[in-house]
């Protein structure tokens, strides 16, 4: 069994990007600039956005954190997005999800200029991804593809079972794994909350990618020997013994499943850090596209 170390791999990617940024500086060019918009005070979202902004600083990007109150109206948020779209100094931005209930997420995502949509959530970019065109790939699926690539996990002709059909992870993941290439060229089954007898699929899977948000859902008796397991789950589970009062727990019962796996991602330290690295990669791409 080999652990797919997302912490180390993400550091490698960040170092590669930092070298390019250094080169840009030496050439007197503008460095990439990412803005992150956060609405409200959700603890997990604040942590993720904080991490994204800190990573920018670490590798030499410019960054801007736009913190907006929970009470902001949809029109006010749309006005802010228009401002960011028109800000020539900015290469890309993200709006951290989920948004408060009174704001229509779809309307917000549609308002983002696709050329600045480094999350790859705008229909234009999502469509390009599905059609094999160059575009921003959503950061979490992009990070998973990079992990598979850098650890030379062979996915060609394999049966990949994705659990969860979210727009951010499961759905794009199913598309990427079915595209031509390695990683890719998989036969993909996309399972979700309405799938019957999910174990029948997982037991026959060569590769399982879980993005469910149910702690320790995938157990050893649900997988076959030699399986590759990618755990996207990051649920905060209350734990009084821990200084923060919770522990981050994945969808996979790591102790049991790892004994049968050929490759497996840990939580934390697997997919999570890769998401941030690939957001930075997309922002670098946005800067290069704007130069052309
Ligand atoms: N919420 C959970 N994951 C993500 C992500 O990758 N991007 C944004 N904008 N929000 C998220």
Image (cartoon, rainbow, N blue to C red):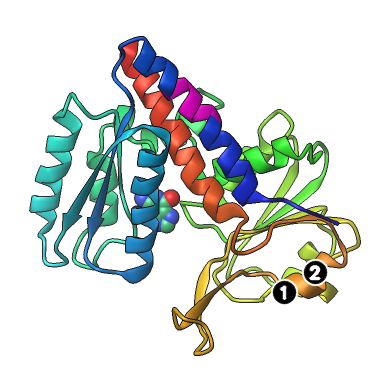
Residue drawn where x is 13% and y is 56% of the image:
74
The C terminus sits in image quarter: top left
On the picture, is 79 further left or further right than 12? left
On the picture, is 130 further left or further right than 245? right
Which quadrant of the figure has residue 112? Answer: top left
Residue drawn where x is 26% and y is 32% of the image:
113
CB under 8 Å between discs 2 and 1:
yes
Q: Is residue 220 visible?
A: yes
Mark 2–mark 1 distance (CA, rounded to whole Å): 6 Å
Residue 186 location in percent, x, y? 75, 41
Residue 66 location in percent, x, y? 19, 49
Q: Is residue 193 magenta?
A: no
> Which residue has dot 1 on it?
253
Q: Is residue 291 above or below residue 265?
A: above
Residue in front for this viewpoint, 50 or 257: 50
Residue 62 location in percent, x, y? 29, 34
Chief SS of the magenta region: helix
Q: Give residue 64's mark.
A: none
Residue 104 location in percent, x, y? 23, 57
Q: Mark 1 Cα within 10 Å, few/some/many (few <14, many 20+)? A: some
The verdict on label 1 being within 8 Å of ligand 1 is no
On the picture, is 185 further left or further right than 115? right
> Which residue has dot 2 on it?
257
Tell me the magenta residue range. Answer: 16-21
Q: What SS does tag 1 mark?
A: loop
Residue drawn where x is 60% and y is 57% of the image:
269
Residue drawn where x is 81% and y is 38% of the image:
154
């Amino acid at each position: 069994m080999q652990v797919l170390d997302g912490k180390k791999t993400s550091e490698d990617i960040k170092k590669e990007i930092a070298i390019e940024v250094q080169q840009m500086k030496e050439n007197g060019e503008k460095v990439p600039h990412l803005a992150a918009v956060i609405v409200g005070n959700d603890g997990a979202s604040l942590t993720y956005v904080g991490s994204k902004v800190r990573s920018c600083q670490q590798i030499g990007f410019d960054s801007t954190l736009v913190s907006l109150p929970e009470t902001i109206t949809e029109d006010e948020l749309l006005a802010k997005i228009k401002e960011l779209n028109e800000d020539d100094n900015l290469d890309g931005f993200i709006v951290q999800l989920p948004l408060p209930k009174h704001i229509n997420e779809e309307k917000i995502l549609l308002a983002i200029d696709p050329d600045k949509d480094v999350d790859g959530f705008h229909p234009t970019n999502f469509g390009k991804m599905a059609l094999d065109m160059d575009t921003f790939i959503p950061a979490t699926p992009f990070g998973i593809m990079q992990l598979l690539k850098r650890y030379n996990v062979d996915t060609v002709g394999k049966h990949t079972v994705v659990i969860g059909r979210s727009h951010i992870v499961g759905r794009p993941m199913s598309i990427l794994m079915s595209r031509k290439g390695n990683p890719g060229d998989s036969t993909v089954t996309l399972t979700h909350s309405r799938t019957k007898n999910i174990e029948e699929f997982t037991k026959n899977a060569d590769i399982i990618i879980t993005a469910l948000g149910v702690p320790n859902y995938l157990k050893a008796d649900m997988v076959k020997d030699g399986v590759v397991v990618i755990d996207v789950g990051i649920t905060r589970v209350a734990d009084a013994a821990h200084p923060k009062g919770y522990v981050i727990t994945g969808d996979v019962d790591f102790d049991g499943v790892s004994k049968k796996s050929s490759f497996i991602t840990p939580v934390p330290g697997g997919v999570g850090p890769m998401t941030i690295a690939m957001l930075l990669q997309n922002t670098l791409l946005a800067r290069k596209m704007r130069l052309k």
